[in-house]
Image: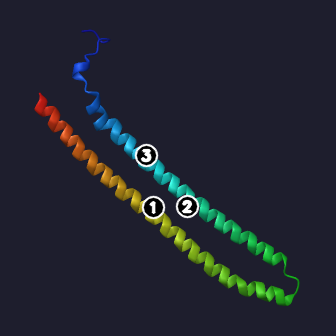
């Protein structure tokens, strides 16, 4: 048999898919889903911070006297508090996404190991 003749009887594409391509596709899908969720979380946070900053600039531009400036400065405490809470919530959201990704990855790995063991046992039993 030369190098260009390939005996398909010795190559089980289902086993190859089960052992390599299937797990790779599943992990890639999980990774893409995680990246998408993370990107959306970052975009939402960026929009919220941008909107807050622009609103503060508009409020500052509307200041016309000392009383307006005093009111603006007093409002800054609330804005700072709101931003701190938003930042904390955004950080918690990212941590939750990461934890979910790790858990799903571990579950996927465990399933793939079990499937690989079953495939190997089946292949060994057939010989």
Q: Position of residue 113 (x, y in %)?
A: 24, 46
- Taking 96 as reference, is 16 left or right? left
Q: Dots 1 and 2: beta carbons under 8 Å?
A: yes
| Quadrant including the C terminus | top left
Q: Residue at x 30, y 49 (%)?
A: 109
Q: Residue at x 63, y 63 (%)?
A: 46
Q: Dots 1 and 3: beta carbons under 8 Å?
A: no
Q: Residues within 10 Å of mark 1 (few under 14, many from 20)?
A: some
Q: Which residue is mark 1?
A: 97
Secondary structure type for disc 3: helix
Q: Quadrant of residue 83?
A: bottom right
Query: Looking at the picture, does residue 116 appear above or below residue 92?
Result: above
Q: Residue at x 52, y 52 (%)?
A: 36
Q: Which residue is mark 2?
A: 41
Q: Position of residue 119 (x, y in %)?
A: 20, 37
Secondary structure type for disc 2: helix
Most extreme residue toward the front, as rendered? 14
Q: Which residue is mark 3?
A: 29
- Taking 72 as reference, is 90 left or right? left
Q: Position of residue 39 (x, y in %)?
A: 55, 55
Q: Residues within 10 Å of mark 3 (few under 14, many from 20)?
A: few
Q: Quadrant of residue 16?
A: top left
């Amino acid at each position: 048999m030369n190098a260009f003749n390939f005996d398909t009887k010795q190559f089980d594409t289902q086993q190859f898919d089960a052992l390599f391509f299937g797990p790779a596709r599943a992990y890639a899908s999980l990774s893409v889903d995680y990246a998408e969720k993370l990107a959306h979380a970052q975009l939402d946070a960026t929009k919220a911070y941008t909107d807050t900053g622009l609103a503060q600039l508009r409020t500052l531009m509307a200041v016309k006297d000392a009383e307006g400036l005093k009111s603006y400065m007093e409002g800054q405490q609330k804005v700072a508090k709101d931003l701190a809470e938003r930042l904390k919530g955004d950080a918690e959201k990212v941590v939750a996404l990461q934890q979910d990704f790790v858990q799903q990855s571990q579950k996927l790995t465990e399933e793939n190991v079990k499937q690989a063991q079953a495939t190997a046992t089946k292949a060994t039993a057939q010989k």
